[in-house]
Amino acid sequence: MIRIAVDGMGGDFAPKTIVKGAESAANEGVAEIVLVGDETLMKPFIHNTKGLEIIHTPVYVEMDESPSTALRKKKDSSINKAFELHKSGYVQAVVSAGNSGATMAFATITLGRIAGVDRPAIAVLHPTESDRLSILLDGGGTVDCKPTHFAQFALMGEAFARLVQGIDAPRVGVLTNGEEETKGNELTRDSHALIKGLGINYIGYVEGGDVTSGKADVVVTDGFVGNIALKVSEGLAEFFFNYFKEHIEKSFKAKLGYLLLKDVFKSLKKKTDYAETGGAPLLGVDGVCIICHGKSNEKAIHNAILLAKKFVEKNLNESIQEAMRGYQALQKTKER
Amino acid sequence: MIRIAVDGMGGDFAPKTIVKGAESAANEGVAEIVLVGDETLMKPFIHNTKGLEIIHTPVYVEMDESPSTALRKKKDSSINKAFELHKSGYVQAVVSAGNSGATMAFATITLGRIAGVDRPAIAVLHPTESDRLSILLDGGGTVDCKPTHFAQFALMGEAFARLVQGIDAPRVGVLTNGEEETKGNELTRDSHALIKGLGINYIGYVEGGDVTSGKADVVVTDGFVGNIALKVSEGLAEFFFNYFKEHIEKSFKAKLGYLLLKDVFKSLKKKTDYAETGGAPLLGVDGVCIICHGKSNEKAIHNAILLAKKFVEKNLNESIQEAMRGYQALQKTKER
């Protein structure tokens, strides 16, 4: 059975929701779970140890700690211990809802990168008008990107969409400010030219609206724009739900209407709830790492473990390795 | 009375919705309206010429035409004729729902820029959780920005929020991928340092979610990120309303619920409808130009005319001129 390490101390509601999510996945036999963290703090929330192992690690990274400080001073933290367990082969994946900068930094340093990958990328799953999710990457890892990073993101996202999401010939687009080739900035224009030649189902420029329209399966951007796009989306969804909540409480008629429409509200909430997808895989590191939202609840952790399992089972990293070899060969041909 | 030129030929539903919006504003005495465009195409939609003048201009810019082509070949188009009327002093403002790239280009060339402004910016009004609107700029004009452009955007947005929106000491933020000073990219970090010293109510970095949270009144970004942020927001709003529409039609219970909740849906739709604000002022040109959404309906055009009127009445450009003089003086002091 697959063994997955979960950072028990990472997340706004850690260790409680993390432990409970890990416990439910372990009890259901999704995977063998290794909870890494402060045993005295985690134990009160554990009721059934079936499939669950605890590795006591008293040090942990705070949510608001600077990743560079954590990197220097907290090599013995729960999150890095999890990656060390992965590196040694004891576990096949790591799930963390902790400080995402520190998680990414430790993952990159302790696991290393897949040969040919210059920068790992956070692949965030986003709901669309169709039944499919779109995959936006990079969701916040690499702020300053070059065209070669975009090309690698495109290849990694394409492999993830194909293998883990099960999409045939995923449509890949570059996020920009208009569909026409004359739009974009220097970075997107050079990336566009490069990605065109990769032999994937590249559909060209896509716009902000296409993160939800479903026009593209994989949306390539840098970590700066990606983070802003995702936060705008999250903020607007919150605004909508808050607006309904506030106004429904104000009148009896509206309350009654809400009761009749409750199923629709619930299904929409479910469709836009990040807990449903669990977390975002960090693509490009030599291992499996799922980065969860800081506010992750029990369900999010449970689903992140399911996603990690699928990532391992589908041998995604082998395909990424292969894609990177192909990419490097192509670049060498160009140089000649 | 103020006289405003409206490009009758610009917009996805032109000339019909444009003519009707202009006519209603003219008939109500909001301003004297000069409709510029092909008389034979516009006339069928005009019923009452009270307050309305037509200037026949058979040439117009297509919605999907490249702005640089338009600039070279269509100096005699309706949109540029409108700006020429403004330049000559015959009208005090221009409203256009046409090709926004061409509108911006002709505005900049025909009207010129306010002394000290390097790049004009599109200031887009966005709904927030509070009663106020946030002002995001640049909404798509200048893709590649420098810190000095950001500083000018901050000053122009601040003046607009204060004078036209009536906000005391507007809170100005720079859009980035995290609140901490260590976040951002080179452009935002240098801009942050520069804007800090401008003597406005600068609140530092704001995130994507703050476009709707209401934390900032003015959100400064470049035209590339600004366009993506706005399109993501528009796309998600569409997704939400479509989702409800589709699911409400499916069941009688849901339909009944919708009827009871209709007022809430309508008020939310109104709050997020760009037709309510009418359009986005192009700040920094030596004149008044409101850029409307391509899909503008009659109400949007009417409201854009109201916004143009307010812009003129509040003497916004005088304040921007003053702010630019102060900025230039400050830069000179620094150089010493």
Image (cartoon, coloured by chain):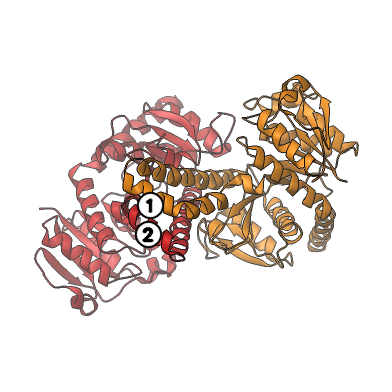
Chain colours: A orange, B red
Decide if residue B124 is in sight here. Answer: no
The residue located at (42%, 60%) in the rendering is B253
Q: Distance between the residues labelled 1 and 2?
A: 7 Å
Q: Mark 1 lies on which chain?
A: A
Q: Which mark is residue A257?
A: 1
Residue A40 placement: quadrant = top right
Vertical comparison of B97 with A103: above or below:
below
Residue furthest to the bottom in view is B40
The number of numbered discs placed on residues in the rendered structure image is 2
Vertical comparison of B86 with A199: above or below:
above
The residue located at (65%, 26%) in the rendering is A66
Decide if residue A311 is in sight here. Answer: yes
Provide the residue designation for mark 2. Answer: B256
**Mark 2 Cα shell of 10 Å, populated few (<14), some (14-19), many (≥20):** some
Residue A167 placement: quadrant = bottom right
Residue B230, position as x, y percentages in the image: 45, 51
User: Is residue A111 found left or right of A211 in the rendered image?
Assistant: right
Type of the residue with mark 1: Gly
Asked if the residues shown at circle 1 and circle 2 are in contact, with their CB atoms under 8 angstroms apart, the answer is yes
Report the quarter where the C terminus of chain B lies.
top left
Residue A275 placement: quadrant = top right
